[in-house]
Image (cartoon, rainbow, N blue to C red):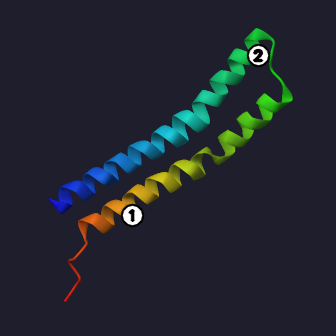
């Protein structure tokens, strides 16, 4: 049962990392900047936050996925190395 829960946590961590890093921090800000440009409301602040979000998106997504893998591995292998 521990192995199943550990694998499930790992899968959820990877999916969450892809969602937050890929969609929320990379694709969605670009879409919002395009919508603001089409509406004639594009400002320097929107451009700046979009650039920063795109720069840090891979770091945040990787850290979230790594955290999920780490926690899932701890759950999977807890108690195996005790004497």
- Regarding mark 1 in the picture, which secondary structure is present there? helix
Q: Residue 32 shows which numbered tag?
A: none
Q: In the shown orientation, is residue 51 left or right of residue 59?
A: right
In percent of width and height, residue 3 lies at 19, 61
Give me the C-alpha separation between circle 2 and circle 1.
41 Å
Q: Between 72 and 22, which is closer to the camera in this rendering? A: 72
Disc 2 crowd, CA 10 A, few/some/many (<14, 14-19, 20+):
some
Q: In the shown orientation, is residue 5 left or right of residue 32?
A: left
Q: Which residue is mark 1?
A: 70
The N terminus lies in which quarter of the figure? Answer: bottom left
> Which residue sits furthest right?
44
In percent of width and height, residue 61 lies at 52, 48
Disc 1 crowd, CA 10 A, few/some/many (<14, 14-19, 20+):
some
Q: In the shown orientation, is residue 29 left or right of residue 36?
A: left
Quick check: 9 above or below 20? below
Q: Residue 37 shows which numbered tag?
A: 2
Q: In the shown orientation, is residue 21 left or right of residue 75?
A: right
């Amino acid at each position: 049962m521990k192995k199943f829960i550990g694998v499930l946590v790992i899968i959820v961590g990877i999916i969450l990392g892809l969602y937050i890093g890929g969609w929320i921090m990379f694709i969605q800000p670009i879409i919002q900047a395009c919508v603001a440009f089409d509406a004639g409301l594009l400002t320097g602040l929107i451009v700046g936050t979009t650039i920063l979000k795109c720069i840090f998106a891979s770091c945040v997504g990787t850290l979230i996925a790594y955290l999920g893998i780490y926690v899932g591995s701890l759950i999977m292998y807890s108690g195996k190395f005790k004497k």
